Amino acid sequence: MKQFFKFMFASCLGMALGLGLLSLIGFGVLGSVMSSSTSDDNIKANSILTINLNGVVPEKTNNAATNPYEFETDDIVGLMDMIKGIERAKDDDNIKGIYIDTPVPSLNFASLAALRKAIEDFKESGKFVIAYADYYSESGYYLASVADEVYLNPVGQVDFNGFVAQIPFFKEMLDKIGVKYEIFYAGDFKSATEPYRLNKMSDNNRQQTREYINDVYNNYLADLSDSRKMTVPVLRNLANELLIQNAEDAVQYGLVDSLMYKDMLLGNMSDRLGLDPKKTIPTISLGKYTTSTQPKVNYKAKDKIAVIYAEGTIVGGSKKAGMVTGDGYSKMIRKIRKDKKIKAIVLRVNSPGGSGLASEKIWRELTLAKEAGIKIVVSMGDYAASGGYYIACMADTILAEKNTLTGSIGVFSMFPNAQKLMNDKLGVRFDTVKTSEYALGPNVAIELSQKEKDMMTAGTTSFYETFLKRVSDGRGMTRDEAHAVAQGRIWTGTRAKELGLVDAIGGLDDAIEIAANMTGLDKFRTVEYPKTKAPLEQLIEDFTGQKTSVKQAMLKEELGEMYPYYERVKTLQSLQGVQALMPFEMKLD
């Protein structure tokens, strides 16, 4: 009987705690909803819009893995909503200027270029734009350079020494622990597997990487030249000779307009606004401004254009935050295809690729939508490579940013062989009884037979030919013409346009405009997919059993800059079948 009461008491206590937690969550959600109903009437007069991009910035608001146990109530505002927010601020009388406070942005250069364009348009209103930091990375300075005036802490620093792409190689480590990857790839430039079979870049990989970063660097210098009124040769020399060694050098050579401390900056802004320097300057973050000034949806417009955000690695399954799932996206596109009010699809791709099978599933549903009379336009972000290009190539029109990393039309398969680790390092051996020679199938503890290797080679080559057919059919090329620009080679958006892989250079708004023109729509509204949840809504889902995003977010926070390497290893562990994945996600700085 004592045990009965003990268990009953424990159950009641657990239920009470659970209800208490859910109540807290409920109040949080209610508070979140109430706070999200803020209107532009709450924007104070003489406000400054502050831009800080040091956190996670997905393409679509809330389309990212988060740590819901932080009880975060604010939306994770996406890049496209940020751009729309800047556009609204241009005509908002309460917003008098922009303050760029982004020393080390989390975005790549294609996304930063889109933001710069929005800020340049904002400047046409006659409102001021200033930038200030204690330190500027090269990407941070790229965004800051669009400002009317760039300020720096007197003992601050500007990184200005050129771009570098650094790739880790793991083969020697794998050799030491007794693990060997059996690797099969199609495409002379398909270098995704090199870190596991080589100790340095192949000549082909070095060539394509050099060409890519040179193209992006040339675009970078050209944009700085326009903003800072300096010639490209002068800027290039500053980096080549390492002339920017301290804050005074940054002023002397024209990268920075003036040195000042933060209190001096605040005084500067008070003067611009005509405010008493003793009073607090009214500011509002771009994220909060964006969510609090959302325009009303025009539900009177019956016709719709679906904007699908395909951002993140392409994987199997149906639901993974911040990833493009084969089954999930196929189901979503199928639903869109059957909606008679949707006349066009704009597919926003920001993906390095991934599972070949998942890419094929998404391609199939997009093709069926196209056959049903729905026009399809692709807008490429930072990445639209390998599987990212696979799902894009069938579109009626493809747009890319000039710094988009695209192409990488090639595939590979990998299978780990840990026999040496098991036998020699751990002393573990396996024995089997089989009804046929290949009943066991590929097994990490036993080396693949030659026939099994031949089978995997044939499967990889066959999928590459399928990939080439998708490209040749979609882009109006012959198989050999597609092969000539494929072989796993990466290109910038500008080069891809020259080669016929892309139709034009432009952003998401351009893609929507083209889609509207294709379908002859004068009045329409856009609907965005996938549907995303606010952080607190996600918490409820995670609390009821979906733990993956929690673990992912906590690891990301703990590992910091090392997280991409962990993620790469986890991706390798989950590889199934042929992969259409770019060599690596290139973060230049």
Image (tube, rainbow, N blue to C red):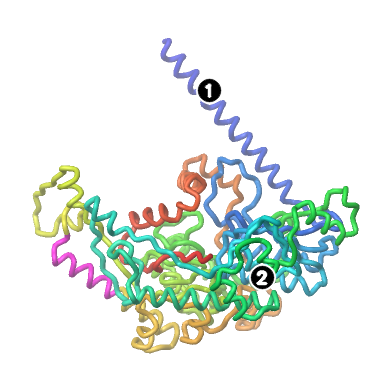
Question: Could you tell me the amino acid type at mark 1?
Answer: Leu
Which residue is more in the foreground, 440 or 99? 99
**Which residue carries the number 1 mark?**
13
Residue placed at 85% from the left, 64% from the top?
A: 93
Q: Quadrant of residue 105?
A: bottom right
Q: Quadrant of residue 248?
A: bottom right
Q: Residue furthest top?
A: 1
Q: Earlier in the sequence, mark 1 or mark 2?
A: 1
What is the number of the mark on residue 46? Answer: none
Which residue is more in the foreground, 509 or 247? 247
What is the number of the mark on residue 116? Answer: 2
Mark 1 burial class by Cα count in 10 Å: few <14, some 14-19, many 20+: few
Mark 2 burial class by Cα count in 10 Å: few <14, some 14-19, many 20+: many
Q: Where residue 319 appears, x then y in whole percent?
A: 46, 55
Residue placed at 51% from the left, 43% from the top?
A: 542
- Residue range corresponding to the magenta coloring: 448-462
Residue placed at 49% from the left, 77% from the top?
A: 214
